[in-house]
Image: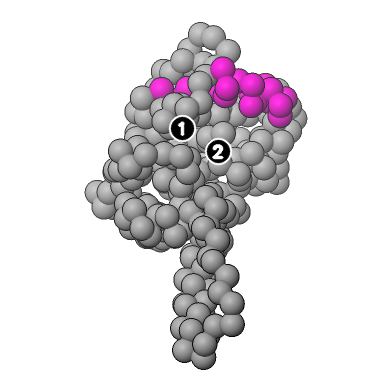
Amino acid sequence: MTRQNYYSLLGVTPEADQTDIDAAYEQQRQRYAPERLGDLADDLRAVAQERLAEIERAYAVLRDPERRRQYDISQGFIPSTPRPVRREPGRRELLSAFAFAFAAVAIVVAVWMFTNRETLSGQAMGEVNRPAPSFTAPALRGGTIDLTQYRGNVVVLNFWGTWCEPCKRELPALQRAYDEFAGQGLMIIGVNLTDDERVQGRTVEDVATFLNQYNVTYPIALDVDGTITEAYRVFPLPTSFFITPDGQIRYVHIGELTFDDIAVRFTELRASGGSQSR
């Protein structure tokens, strides 16, 4: 799990102007449109709806200049203005100051409770059975990645971004699974939300540098215009899809993956050969 501030929920930085915030909100809002939630399992729909509620709360604050300023102060993004010190204040002044301080503390506590709660109530692994949308995308290290070329393998399709803390934490597990099981029929493909990276000022070279720090060697597809993310109806990050050898999505995992998560599902789907498990 990761704790996010209002800016990271929308996928922008605290320096973003209002135009960028509005655009980021609309992009996130489209991902959670009701028509995209209809055929999700109940647990996944609940996670998506909770995420949408958090995005709406964040935008309600960030679109209001005064509420945004107060939020930025509470988070330490901008310094608060020191209040002048009065000498020997009267009783009424003391009472007023106490009331103001109490209200300010209450506001800060309320903001802290909202912004420091878990982004998701828990990890979710839902079982589905639908065809995996095909795609061809630029590969980070050159060439292209065509999903259909991996038919016959169990594929873990992992959607991620460099700003996503649980995405960072799961990278070693994904790499370990790739190292141990690639020769046995497992393919891991990371799908980087490159369009969102660019909104935040990061380049493809920045993405490559980031992955080099984690010694990631499995293929990385660049979703440069958001079409892959749209096709898979991705909600929070990270989201991973377990695809059978015959090209069906069998499991959707929202949240941080562990090595055991991958090993168990790979063993199951390799043994089933793509048939629906019950």
Sequence-wise, the earlier of marks 1 and 2 is: 2
Q: Pointer 1 and pointer 2: residues touching (CB < 8 Å)?
A: yes
Which residue is at 37% across, 29% downward? 226
Q: Is any atom of residue 56 visible in this view?
A: no
The residue lying toward the viewer, choosing from 237 and 131, is 237
Which residue is at 51% across, 16% downward? 139
The residue lying toward the viewer, choosing from 99 and 259, is 99
Q: Which residues are magenta?
A: 205-224
Colour scheme employed for the rendering of this structure: one colour
Question: Label 1: how many residues lie within 10 Å, few (<14), some (14-19) or many (20+)?
Answer: some
- Give the label, 1 or 2, closer to the camera: 1
Image quarter of residue 262: top right
Q: Quadrant of the N terminus?
A: bottom right
Amino acid at the residue labelled 1? Gln
Q: Position of residue 126 (x, y in %)?
A: 48, 52
Residue denoted by label 1:
200
Residue denoted by label 2:
163
